[in-house]
Amino acid sequence: MGHHTRKFTAPEDVGFNLPECARGFVVEFKGNENWHTLPEVKLENGSKLRLYAATQLSQVRHIWKQFQRSAWHTPFQNFDWINAWFESKNLSSRAKPLIILGFKEGQLQFILPFATETYFGLRRLVWAANEVNDYNSPLIKTEFLPQLSTAIVGEIYQHISRHISGIDVFYLTRQPKFLAGIANPFVSSNARRSSCDSHSICLDSNWSNLYTQQRSAKSRSRLRQKTRRLKRAGKLHFMAIRGPQLQASIDRILQWKSVQLEQKGERNPFDRKSQGSVLTQTIRQFASVDTKNNPLRVYGLFLDGEMIAGLIAFVEKKTFSLFTMSYGPEVFTNCSAGSILLVKTIELAARAKLLNYDFLAGDEPYKLSWCDQKLDLYDCVFATTGIGQLGAFASNARLEVKKSLKASIPAMNFLKKTNRSRLQIQGALAKLKTPHTKRFNHAGNR
């Protein structure tokens, strides 16, 4: 291998130390005077499930962090991720925590990380950080999952709506069809498919076999040619990004992604001028949490020491979850720096003996071309009050329209074209406005 490549001898070579996972870890009930007690729920085997509600994250911080070490959950139910979302700008005054804890025989079985928010005058219950999450689900002990049914979950929801005042609508979106391979009891029978699915690869530690199965000989040859083209331009290497450069690298990756989405006319969740800024702030805040168990990872492809492509991911519980990736506008044409980086991270995950490479939610072509597993996502929206009926109807209608539009190629092409035109007009107006503003300020200061 030449000096431009890096040999993977151990996961730590690129910052791949996995967060701890405490097997058999038990979280016992010690009581908390700040929790609200909800009515008990009787399980099918006759045992009772004790329910408690907390309205501040500080009330559950310790028990949540203990429980997430062994409970099944996705990266989006990590306490620090949820906390980062609540701390993001403009959110604290709108969304409030409502954390439900379920105990059986004194041992914690699940945490339901909910939030309440006001939406067009209605108070609705949502999964915390739902707007930035790819998956919305509980933290739950896998051995307890079979004891829950949709009927029992429905009873839990009834207790919440009756004893937590003012909730008009349950708005629960992007819920996986399965949790730890078991049918998700939080997906009710009247749930509707979300507007997108999630996709993943079942990994094989034998990278050569996996790569051969996933990519044709022509595709592998073409990527090797593009890699050689970049190597002729300078020293090419792949590495994990840590330390002082982490935040700056995250900002650059998100900025590149924002520009690329706008150029395509696609929805831009990283736009700092819109609600999407919450996502950017959540990622930055989460990355600043200095703990050895932080699952956030950032990787870059570098040419002569300058990053030309970057990728943000979560790594925990034997799964590599790709959150977003992008490449610099100055990258050589047709060199596919993003594809090279993607293959490097899949190779890294496979050699580290992870079980899955999760592309998360979204139906982008590159995800479809790689995946060998698809996970359906579901939305559950229902009213708990008379006034909430109209809100639930409107929300379901909006979700159906969104799904229909995404399923129509002509409609999506039209929307993308319209969005590109809108952004071009906004850019032109901004350029016209800037000189005028300068002249006005100059005259005002004389």
Image (cartoon, grey):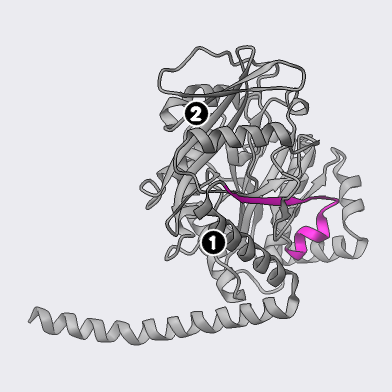
Q: Position of residue 389 (x, y in %)?
A: 56, 55
Q: Taking the image as drawn, is residue 17 in sight?
A: no
Q: Quadrant of the C terminus?
A: bottom left
Residue pictured at 71% horizontal, 73% vertical: 334
Classify 10 Å Cα crowding around label 1: few (below 14), some (14-19), many (20 and above).
some
Residue type, numbered disc 1: Pro
Q: Which mark is residue 269?
A: 1
Q: Nearer the viewer, residue 168 or 254?
A: 168
Residue identified by numbered label 2: 53
Residue pictured at 74% horizontal, 40% vertical: 8
Left or right, 209 with respect to 341, comes to: right
Q: Answer with the quarter of the image where residue 340 lies.
A: bottom right
Q: Secondary structure at mark 1?
A: loop
First along the sequence among labels 2 and 1: 2
Q: In the image, is residue 148 part of the stretch drawn in magenta?
A: no
Left or right, 377 with respect to 166, comes to: right
Q: Nearer the viewer, residue 2 or 183?
A: 183
> In this picture, which residue range is highlighted in magenta?
364-383
Left or right, 181 with respect to 28, comes to: right
